[in-house]
């Protein structure tokens, strides 16, 4: 077990279906989900208010709200595949993932749930890795696994595959970009079956969701978020593994990189990470030495959400706030300063716009109109 | 020219011969030389006192003092080979080397003296380097040379040779471990001839001195000392290049290391340097970016030597100080505290012991009896 896990939650069956309906409704992401539940007190209450909020945000099309029947169908199909839908704080939800701002409200979990509560290290890297890279990834995964860590990765070809295979006995976690029934790449169905026998697989996507390109960076935040740190084994410049490393740093996770010759383009990304401050590692002991002090500390819970919403803002406030927004991203704090309205009113208008599918949140507190 | 070089010195011919006699006398190293000249006012005055000091230190054998005839002979043989004997602060003495605590009082300089006044970068590494390492060293030397830096190295096989060859046109410095007439390895005579045509070679050793194993670490301090920073290209664990890197760090020089695969034993030393804080580089621009701010600053002169010596210490003080010493190294500061004598008296006794060949200075202020 990861040390000092946060306090446990347990949803009732009815709550779980409400949560599933809310997170599967149009334009509701993890942050919006949390904001709605905090403000309205429950997912059910939020569901009742969704159409009104989206209308006020100027939804041009009808906002699709997930029906109870749809949620029940997904719940039962998931169960048939052995997938449990688990909330942060419940057993089987990786503890470090549970405390992220944008932790999925419900995570589809398949396999040995107790394994997912143990300390994890992510190993990621190129799909077209060199023989040396594959060998190193396997050795590192085996050594970390022997030391008691669960190895998290993305089930891709190359480094991911090597890391999973070498840690199957000790327990490894495959983090999927699509639904549990849409394994990518398809030829890794057998690898996945072997992984869940003694480890696990997680996804925040509904069954039937085939992964699109944009789902991979979104998925990568779960790989790093579940882990104490991320090891990048081989990566060219501008590769997906570097996105994972950036997200890991933003999440406060350790970033480790394996060095390589400057003449090897597959090491350009990892060498660059080290230049930017990632820790150079040449073996498992370097990783263990760095994460041991972190494992001693309790897992930090999210600060309680203090960002209150307002009752329906008046029309002139809303118009002024919308007029300050545009396609160029603006900081939320700047917007609040310029809007001459209460922070709660600004947040409420942004939530309305978001539910109407008109607002994009870009991270780092930046927002823009779509 | 390196920016803001320290003030210039010019010895008279007679002074130069006195300096040569003093530094070529038994048990007189650069630090002892400086201490003697500071205390007695000139090399000539120090030479007169040497036999007495060594006797007081308990010299078991007669201390050989370099005669005027020997010094004149070395001076003239050096001139015949095109080697000038140059003091710190004189034209042709690399300015950054001149300000070291243990700068050679006279440096044998051959070749284009003005080149040796320009900013330098050292490139060092394995003698049995890989093809990739040799290629990288050549490319790096060429790029740094094109950017106006002189490349300093040790004329060895492997990385050194590659770095010298690639920077011959722009000017490169070979730092020798033996006398100018005892080139090592002998097959690099031709390379050395090409180097001094547009660059230079330096040695602190007399003509005729064939380099022994222990001369190489001593020589390495000149490679790093003359340079803004040292790049280690390929190095196994416990290799000579790592000694150069350690000395460079002690001298306050930048230490750069080229990364490599953890599976390549020739990269183990450089990866280890990066773990210990050396800057990972993958090309010349990384080096230039790091040294540019240093080039802007004036070269720091040594603090004036405030460490006065005493007149002849009394016999009981001397006996007490000697009894506190042994083969186990002790800090000079601890010795002064425990000796119940003035710091000047302690320093004087140590100088006497050193001249008698009975004391070893181990760096970091540690001394021990031999």
Image (cartoon, coloured by chain):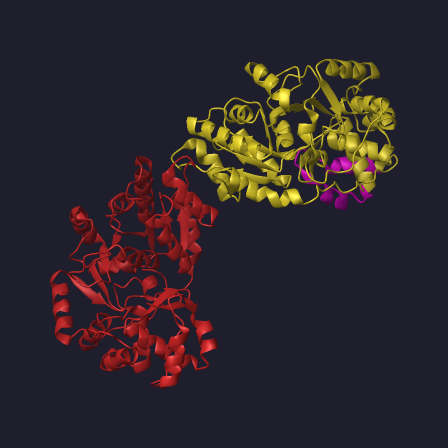
Chain colours: A red, B yellow
Q: Is residue B341 magenta?
A: yes
Q: Nearer the viewer, residue A328 or B16?
A: A328
Locate the C terminus of chain B by quadrant. top right
Q: Where is B307 relative to A370, above or below? A: above
Q: Nearer the viewer, residue B184 or A150?
A: B184
Name the quadrant of the N terminus of chain B: top right
Which one is in front, A119 or B77?
B77
Question: Does residue A276 appear left or right of residue B104 in this picture?
Answer: left
Q: Position of residue A165 (x, y in %)?
A: 24, 45
Task: Find residue B233 and report its horizontal and vertical position in percent.
Answer: 50, 33
Query: Can you see residue B176?
Result: no
Asked which quadrant contains residue A350, the reply is bottom left
Q: Is residue B14 left or right of residue B301?
A: right
The part of the image, by quadrant, that contains residue A292 is bottom left
Using the rendered view, name the quadrant where residue B268 is placed: top left
Judge left or right: residue A190 versus residue B61.
Answer: left
Query: x, y percentage for residue A167?
Result: 27, 47
Residue A213 highlighted magenta (yes or no): no
Vertical position of residue A76 compared to residue B251: above or below? below
> Does B156 sit above or below residue A21?
above
In the picture, measured across the screen, residue A56 lies left or right of residue A307, that is: left
| Residue A260 shows in this picture | yes
Relative image position of residue B190 (x, y in whole percent): 57, 15
Q: How many marks?
A: 0
Q: Residue at x 39, y 55 (%)?
A: A246
Residue at 55 percent across and 31 percent down: it is B123
Give the overall secondary structure of the magenta segment.
Answer: helix
Part of the protein shown in magenta: B317-343
The answer to whether residue B90 is above or below residue A120 is: above
């Amino acid at each position: 077990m990861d040390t000092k896990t946060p306090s446990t939650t347990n949803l009732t069956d009815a709550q779980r279906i409400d949560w599933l309906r809310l997170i599967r409704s149009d334009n509701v992401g993890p942050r919006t989900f949390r904001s709605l539940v905090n403000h309205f007190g429950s997912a059910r209450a939020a569901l009742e208010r969704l159409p009104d909020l989206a209308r006020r945000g100027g939804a041009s099309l009808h906002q699709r709200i997930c029906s109870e029947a749809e949620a029940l169908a997904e719940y039962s199909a998931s169960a048939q595949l052995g997938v449990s839908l688990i909330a942060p704080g419940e057993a089987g939800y990786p503890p470090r993932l549970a405390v992220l701002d944008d932790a999925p409200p419900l995570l589809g979990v398949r396999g040995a749930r107790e394994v997912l509560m143990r300390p994890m290290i992510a190993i990621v890297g190129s799909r077209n890795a060199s023989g040396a890279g594959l060998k190193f990834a396997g050795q590192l995964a085996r050594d970390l696994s022997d030391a008691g860590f669960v190895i998290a990765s993305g089930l891709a070809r190359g480094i991911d595959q090597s890391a999973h295979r070498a840690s199957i006995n000790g327990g490894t976690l495959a983090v999927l970009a699509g639904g549990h029934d849409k394994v990518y790449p398809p030829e890794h169905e057998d690898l996945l079956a072997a992984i869940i026998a003694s480890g696990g697989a997680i996804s925040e996507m509904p069954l039937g969701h085939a992964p699109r390109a944009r789902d991979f960076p979104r998925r990568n935040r779960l790989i790093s978020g579940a882990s104490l740190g991320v090891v990048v084994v081989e990566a060219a410049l501008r590769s997906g593994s570097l996105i994972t490393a950036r997200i890991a740093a933003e999440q406060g996770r350790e970033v480790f990189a394996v060095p390589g010759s400057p003449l090897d383009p597959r090491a350009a990304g990892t060498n660059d990470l080290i230049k930017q401050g990632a820790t150079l590692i040449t073996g498992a002991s370097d990783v263990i030495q760095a994460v041991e002090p972190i494992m001693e500390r309790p897992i930090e819970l999210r600060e309680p959400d203090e960002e209150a919403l307002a009752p329906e803002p008046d029309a002139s406030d809303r118009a002024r706030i919308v007029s300050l927004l545009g396609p160029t991203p603006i900081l939320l704090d700047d917007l609040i300063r310029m809007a001459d309205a209460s922070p709660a009113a600004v947040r409420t208008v942004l939530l309305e716009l978001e539910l109407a599918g008109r607002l994009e949140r870009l991270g780092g507190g930046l927002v823009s109109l779509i």
